[in-house]
Amino acid sequence: MAEKGIMKTTQSTTISALKSLSTDERLNDETRITRFKRIGIACAMALLVFLSMSATSSAQTSITIGGGLAIPNDQVNNVYNSLSIADNTSKVWSTLRESTKLGYDLNVRLRFPLAESIFFDGGVGFARFPQSTITVADPSNNDTLVQLLSTQNVVPISAGLDYFLFRSVISPYVSAELQYNYMSSTVDYAAGNGIGVPLNLDTAPVDSRVGAAVGAGFMLNLAITSLNVDLRYHMVNLVGKTSDEQSKSYVSLNLGLAWGFTK
């Protein structure tokens, strides 16, 4: 009888442990699924850049490396997507953001023809917006509690189409694309200002959103290579915004060199 009691106790303990393990596994699975969702679109769009390259190996394929200006709207540095922030005592403080500063944009693009005037256009970029100030103040009297410094980065992975109006020494085009945007920011206290203030602060907020871009440009044939001038309007967070999140966008004006593109 004692042995049966011990066996039942052991079985009960084992079942409880298995249930606990099963719960932990479910939670881990949910975490994995969330992560997969975040990177799934990025992987799919990255694959589109290189998809069918073997089928188009005999066709005209070009690579463009470019860089230039990134001109943001006033929401790009809204890193917390809110007009307020809480401290460790749950008191809510208002925030006042300095206008996002002019940044720079770097990108690599791959093009290959799908028809006489239509080209697949895909690539990856990096837009960085320099340090701007966020003032945290008491909403009742606007007294400043602390000043924060924030820097924003946007990494778009894109896939779309270019339509060339005509092909000559100068070949103008219009463009449209979908993007998966990875957005990261760094937030620090201003030097000598507010160190140790008990804000409930994420100093490295990260978001990912689905966006799009439209633009226009032209290729200038220089014989050995081609000069690419490209203007695009990037809508960073069209899909996946939180309830309080405002639309974020920027305009890029890039100058690049293209190899493999002929008129």
Image: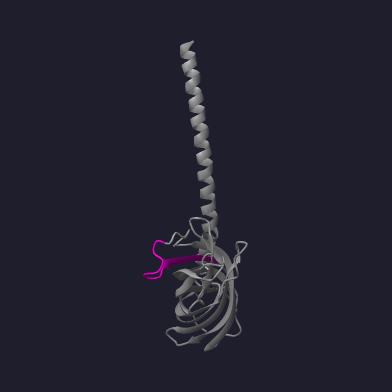
Considering every residue shown, the one lying at the far left of the view is 192
The front one of 189 and 45 is 189
For the point 55% across and 70% down, which residue is it? 141
- Residue 78 at what x, y percent from top left? 53, 69
Considering every residue shown, the one lying at the far front of the view is 141
For the point 51% across and 24% down, which residue is it? 12
Considering every residue shown, the one lying at the far top of the view is 1
Q: On screen, 205 above or below 114?
A: above
Q: On screen, 224 above or below 86?
A: below
For the point 53% across and 88% down, which residue is it? 170
Q: Which residues are magenta?
A: 180-196
Image coloring type: one colour
The quadrant where residue 176 appears: bottom right
- Residue 251 at what x, y percent from top left? 54, 79
Q: Is residue 128 visible?
A: no
The front one of 254 and 227 is 254
The front one of 178 and 153 is 153
Is 134 in the magenta?
no
- Residue 149 at what x, y percent from top left? 44, 70
- Residue 82 at what x, y percent from top left? 56, 65
The front one of 73 and 114 is 73
Image check: 196 left or right of 247? left
